[in-house]
Image (cartoon, rainbow, N blue to C red):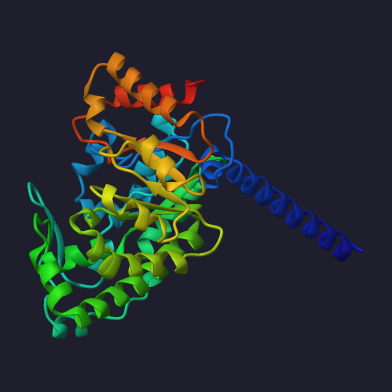
Amino acid sequence: MGQDNRSAASSQQVAQVDNSQDEKSLLLHNSPFMKACRREKTERTPIWLMRQAGRYMKEFREIRSRVTLLELCKTPELACEVTVHAQEKLGVDAAIIFSDILVPLDALGVGLDYVKGEGPVIERPLRQESELDSLPELDVRESLSYVMQAISLTRKALKPDIPLLGFAAAPFTLASYLIEGGSSRNYENTKTMMYCRPELWQRLMSKIVSISIDYLNAQIEAGAQAVQVFDSWMGCLSVPDYQKFSHPYSAQLIAGIKKDVPVIHFGTGNVHLLPLMKTAGASVLGLDWRVDLAKKWDELGDNIAVQGNLDPCVLFADQRYIRSTTENLLASVASKPGYIFNLGHGVLPPTDVDNVRFLVDLVHDYKG
């Protein structure tokens, strides 16, 4: 009899856990951000910001004074702390895990470092077939386990109605960093490989796609509700070059991500590429500040959600100007379903955090 009672109690506890999980899943599913990704009507315009956790926040600067960027990325507890703090301090509708798009290159052992005044530097750029052959086969769940641990911790720490985004670099952007060895103005080495050694380019891109699919799916399994693909450097390509050398691989990546998980595809300087970019298959297109968002959305059609695209430098202005510019952008989309407010790039380090909070409140309070 006692055993029967224990079994019944155990079953009741399991049912309570299942019900609790169902309630949390429903809260996330019905959150403004997730509804906008599905192009459903929302009670308010959702907002989150690229580089949401960054040097413009005093608390972030204090942590960075003690650790390097890579150390912060590789310490799940710290990555969780800065992610959750930024979401709660700003009151935004989604969190994005603190990491860096280049951590897969660190896992490949090519010597990633961040040099003050220069940005990321790859000690051993990839230019030859032998260098590609020497790259290891990655088990991202092992070599990048710290990212998944950070996501798991963050998902538990966030409020149950706040979605968490994972992210990765698009294949072209990650390959370009690896080939150039860091930032570039003209992408000479990348384009030389594309034009003169297309077989090597294809092999490299296929490897990156495979790694990135595994990486994004592992982030989803760890607790991310959506993912963003950053194609920061795609704007350097002409339409024919994008169509031949980049678009197929972005499409492969997006097709390999777990179904029913929203994918945001973001690029910069790419207004000429947006119609093709749409066909890569993402749920949401992120637009930079150079684009007339409302006009471009009309051209793209209503069958895709759009994210963007306030110029980050607007946040250096006084709050009267921030208000007028923000309200003009909101008015231009006329509360159309599928709109997510964001900057046209990340929050810049000199930004006043009070202006960022003012922006978030403006977007939430806007009635149209």
Please name the residue shown 39% across and 35% down the image: 294
Query: Horizontal placement of 242 versus 219: left or right?
Result: left
Image-based side of 204 in relation to 118, left or right: right
Residue 152 visible in the shown view: yes
Q: How many marks?
A: 0
Taking depth in this image into account, of 209 and 83 the one nearest to the observer is 209
Look at 23% across and 47% down and name the residue there: 269
Task: Tell which residue pokes out farthest to the right in this image.
Answer: 1
Q: Is residue 167 visible?
A: no
* The furthest residue to the top: 320
Quadrant holding the N terminus: bottom right
Question: Compared with residue 113, is residue 60 higher up or lower down, i.e. above or below?
Answer: above
On the image, the x and y values in percent for residue 133 come to 21, 85
Q: Is residue 235 above or below residue 61?
A: below
- Which of the 4 quarters of the picture holds residue 11? bottom right
Q: Residue furthest front?
A: 299
Name the spot of residue 197 as percent of width and height, x first. Answer: 15, 80
Image coordinates of residue 272 in percent, x first then y, are: 27, 51
Toward which corner of the image does residue 170 lie, by quadrant? bottom left
Task: Please name whichever residue, 55 or 300, is drawn nearer the observer in this view of the structure.
Answer: 300
Q: Which residue occupies 23% across, 20% down?
A: 317
Residue sitting at 46 percent across and 48 percent down?
Answer: 164
Left or right side of 267 for 360: right
Determine which quarter of the picture holds residue 176: bottom left
Q: Position of residue 122 (x, y in %)?
A: 13, 64
